[in-house]
Amino acid sequence: MKSAPFVYHAPKTVDDAVAELAEFGPLDGRVLAGGQSLVPMMAFRLARPTHLVDINSVAGLDRLAVEGDTLSIAACVRHAAFHRSVVSGPTGSLLSAVASNIAHYPIRLRGTFCGSLAHADPASEWCLTAVTLGAEIVAASRRGRRVIAADDYFEGMMVTALAEDELLLEARLPLLAPDTHFGFYEFSRRAGDYALAMALVTFRLRDGVIVEPRVGVGGAEARPRRMAKAEALLAGQSAGTETFRAAAEAAADAIDPLEDVHADAAFRLDLVRAVTRRALEQALG
Ligand SMILES: Cc1cc2nc3c(=O)[nH]c(=O)nc-3n(C[C@H](O)[C@H](O)[C@H](O)COP(=O)(O)OP(=O)(O)OC[C@H]3O[C@@H](n4cnc5c(N)ncnc54)[C@H](O)[C@@H]3O)c2cc1C
C-alpha cells in the first residue's frame, strides 16, 4: 500500500528543523530520521503524518563524540556506526555487542540511535541501553533545550516525554569505568527479530565482590527498566552462580510481563530469568 499524502520538508539547520516542528508538530507532523520504523508504518497506514520533517540534511546531526566523561550521539548517528568500537574501553565494546542484535544489516545502515529512542519500542536494544547506563536525552524546540534523564523519558509503550514540537537532538551516555564488566543477552525467535526478552548488566569487582551493579531488562514490559531488587541482591556479594540465580529470580519476580502472540506471561518470565542470568554470567567471563 502507498502512504497517505504528506508534505515533505528538508531543513538544513537545527533552528529551521525546530521552527518547522513548531509549525507542523501540532498538525501531526513527524520527524523523519532513518525511516526504518516510520516508513513501514506509513506504508501500512498505521501512521498518517501530514508533514514530514526530514532531518538527514541538517548540519552536525551525524556527530558522535566523547565530551569529558560522556559519549554524545547526535540525532542522525546510524546503528551501523557502532559496528566498530566508537570509544576505547568497555563502553565501545558494549555498544558494538548490542548493535549487532538490532534488526538486519541494511536496516542498521539507515536506522538511527536517537530514532530508536524517539520511537520507544519496548524491544529496542538502544532504549534498554539508555535506561541501564543512565543516559541523558537532549530535546530541542523553539522554547529552548532541555535535558531529560532516561528514567523519566520512557513513559510507556512507544510513549516518551518528548513533546510533539520537540526534536531529540542528542543522547548522552556516561562512559563506563575501564574495569567495568558487562553482559548482554537477548532471546528472539530468529536472528534480526525483535527481542522477546533481553538483559543488559554491568558491574565492577573488588576482590571478587560485586560493586555498582546495574541490571536492565527490555522486551518484557511496556518499557525497559532497571531491576532494583536484583541490583540490591548483587551489590556486595561474591560474583558466582548462586548470586546470579538469585538476582535473575528477583528480576523475573519484578516483571509485569507483556503477553502477545509470541509469548504468554509465563514464558516471558522464564525468558527474563534466563536472559538475566546469562547476561550476568557473560559479564563475569
Ligand atoms: C524488519 C525490521 C526489523 C527491526 N528490528 C529491530 C530490532 O530488532 N531492534 C530495534 O531496536 N529496532 C528494530 N527495527 C527498527 C529500527 O531499528 C529503526 O531504525 C528504529 O526503530 C527507528 O529509527 P529510525 O532512525 O529509522 O527512525 P524513523 O523510522 O525515522 O522514526 C521513528 C519514529 O521516531 C520519530 N523520530 C525519529 N528521530 C527523531 C528525532 N531525532 N526527534 C524526534 N522524533 C524522532 C519519528 O518521527 C517516528 O515517529 C526494525 C525495523 C525493521 C523494518
Image (cartoon, rainbow, N blue to C red):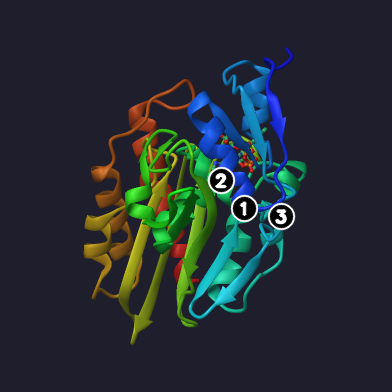
Q: Quadrant of residue 134?
A: bottom left
Q: Does residue 195 appear in the picture of this structure?
A: no
The residue at the point 22 percent across, 56 percent down is 229
Q: Secondary structure at mark 3?
A: helix
Which residue occupies the foreground of this view, 224 or 266?
Answer: 224
Of badges 3 and 2, nearer the viewer stands 2
Q: Amino acid at mark 1?
A: Val
- Check disc 2 and report the residue beneath it: 18
Quadrant for the N terminus in the image: top right
Q: Amino acid at mark 3?
A: Ala
- Mark 3 or mark 2: whose residue is earlier in sequence: 2
- Mark 3 or mark 1: whose residue is earlier in sequence: 1
Pinpoint residue 195: horizontal percent, then vertical percent.
52, 40
Which residue occupies the foreground of this view, 156 or 190?
Answer: 156
Of badges 3 and 1, nearer the viewer stands 1
- Check disc 3 and report the residue beneath it: 80
Q: CA distance from mark 1 to mark 2?
A: 6 Å
Which residue occupies the foreground of this view, 147 or 77?
Answer: 147
Q: CB atoms at circles 1 and 2 under 8 Å apart?
A: yes
